[in-house]
């Protein structure tokens, strides 16, 4: 071959990069021989993301998991559903991605983060939550990046819940939006075995719901599942009282109250939260969704409620899962789930993972 100027420059550049035309490409990393689907590996050709898989393999105890931004989000948005599932013999897992180190007027951030961790552990005992994780990201600095997505994927696979709850991605707080986006982006990847291959895909992969909110953009919240709070309100109030740094110091000024005037006894604090502040929006949920609540209960329904909306990006719930939730007195308003015949996947009809 004639070594003209173009060939010479190309050859020189190739050599400068430390490459060789004769050098074989690097071999792909060798994964260990453990079955990538863990215990589910014997279900050859079955994808744990399909509702038919969840239907065929449904077993108790039922597990619910809430992934929120801050060390009280789960308590206020899903305290009743977690408590009622735990009380019925199931398991409840709470996750706070942030450490709560910004929500205060006068405490130092490091001291506040330590205090808020203690508050989560106290609250979890009241509600019967089995584990309350605090992942440690600083408030107001969390992003829905690849690192967070992978970390949450591993944690979700580790816990293997039936139902996963998080924030909608249309929320006033950037931290809530970031966590909601990260969870939403992971919903399909839960079941991709070569994504985070160090974390085997479990037999159970969750269907996903959003906790209730008042926001109307880009669309108003839709109540697909309603959990009445009236019968467990005292327990919820006792759990919320545990978040002292928020409910009696940081948040009262937003509602026109002076933290110096807060009650100090348990019953007084529960009464203040019930009558003056009512965190977690259960009273607002009851007002906003009154028509759906009363219709679901066939008359006047509970005054306080938690509401949840199905996430379209995850698998649909299996009929047995909905039946279990209804057996606890929860009201299912979404269309009844149906099992699709093998070979038809309406959620991913356009092709494969990649």
Image (cartoon, helix red, strand yellow):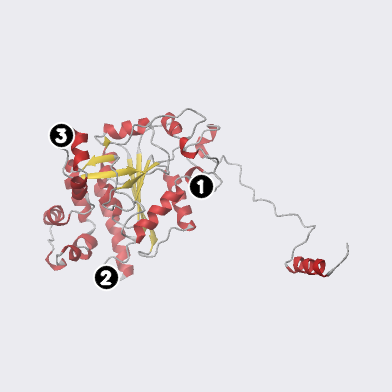
What x and y, as percent, mark residue 43? 52, 32
The alpha-carbon separation of the residues under discs 2 and 3 comes to 48 Å
Q: Are dots 1 and 2 in contact, CB under 8 Å?
A: no
> Which residue occupies the foreground of this view, 300 or 116?
300
**Label 2: which secondary element:** loop
Which residue ends up furthest to the right in the rendered image? 2
Q: Residues within 10 Å of mark 3 (few under 14, many from 20)?
A: few
Image mark for residue 105: none
Q: Is residue 84 above or below residue 135?
A: above
Give the residue drawn at x 49%, y 57%. Answer: 146
Quadrant hosting residue 352:
top right
User: Between disc 1 and disc 2, whose residue precedes?
Assistant: 2
Report which residue position mark 2 lands on. Answer: 107
**Label 1: which secondary element:** loop
Quadrant hosting residue 34:
top right
What x and y, as percent, mark residue 191? 49, 42
Give the residue drawn at x 61%, y 45%. Answer: 32
Q: Residues within 10 Å of mark 2 (few under 14, many from 20)?
A: some
Report which residue position mark 1 lands on. Answer: 199
Q: Please tell me whether mark 3 or mark 1 is closer to you in this view.
A: 3
Which residue ends up furthest to the top in the rendered image? 341
Report which residue position mark 3 lands on. Answer: 299
**Label 3: which secondary element:** loop
Q: Quadrant of the N terminus?
A: bottom right
User: Between disc 3 and disc 1, whose residue precedes?
Assistant: 1
């Amino acid at each position: 071959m004639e070594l003209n100027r173009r060939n010479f420059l190309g050859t020189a550049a190739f050599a400068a990069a430390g490459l060789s035309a004769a050098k074989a490409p690097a071999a792909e990393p060798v994964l260990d021989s453990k079955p990538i689907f863990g215990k589910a590996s014997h279900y050859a050709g079955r994808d744990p993301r399909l509702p038919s898989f969840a239907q065929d393999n449904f077993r108790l105890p039922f597990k619910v998991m809430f992934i929120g931004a801050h060390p009280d989000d789960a308590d206020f948005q899903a305290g009743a559903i977690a408590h009622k599932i735990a009380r019925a013999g199931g398991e409840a897992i709470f996750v706070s991605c942030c450490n709560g180190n910004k929500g205060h007027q006068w405490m130092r951030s490091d001291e506040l983060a330590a205090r808020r961790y203690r508050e989560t552990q106290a609250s979890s005992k009241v509600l019967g939550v089995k584990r309350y994780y605090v992942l440690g990201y600083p408030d107001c600095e969390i992003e829905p990046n690849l690192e967070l997505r992978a970390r949450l994927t591993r944690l979700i696979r580790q816990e293997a819940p039936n139902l996963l709850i998080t924030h909608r991605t249309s929320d006033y707080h950037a931290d809530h939006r970031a966590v909601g986006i990260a969870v939403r982006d992971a919903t399909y990847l839960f079941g991709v075995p070569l994504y985070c291959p160090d974390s085997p895909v479990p037999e159970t992969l969750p269907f996903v719901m959003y906790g209730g909110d008042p926001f109307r953009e880009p669309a108003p919240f839709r109540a697909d599942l309603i959990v009445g709070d009236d019968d467990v309100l005292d327990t919820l109030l006792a759990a919320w009282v545990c978040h002292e740094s928020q409910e009696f110091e940081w948040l009262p000024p937003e509602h026109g109250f002076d933290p110096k005037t807060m009650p100090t006894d348990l019953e007084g604090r529960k009464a203040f939260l019930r009558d003056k502040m009512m965190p977690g929006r259960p009273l607002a949920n009851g007002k906003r969704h009154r028509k759906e609540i009363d219709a679901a209960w066939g008359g006047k329904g509970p005054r306080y409620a938690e509401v949840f909306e199905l996430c379209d990006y995850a698998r649909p719930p299996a009929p047995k899962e909905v039946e279990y939730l209804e057996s606890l007195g929860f009201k299912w308003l979404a269309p009844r789930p149906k099992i699709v015949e093998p070979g038809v996947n309406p959620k991913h009809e356009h092709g494969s993972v990649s």
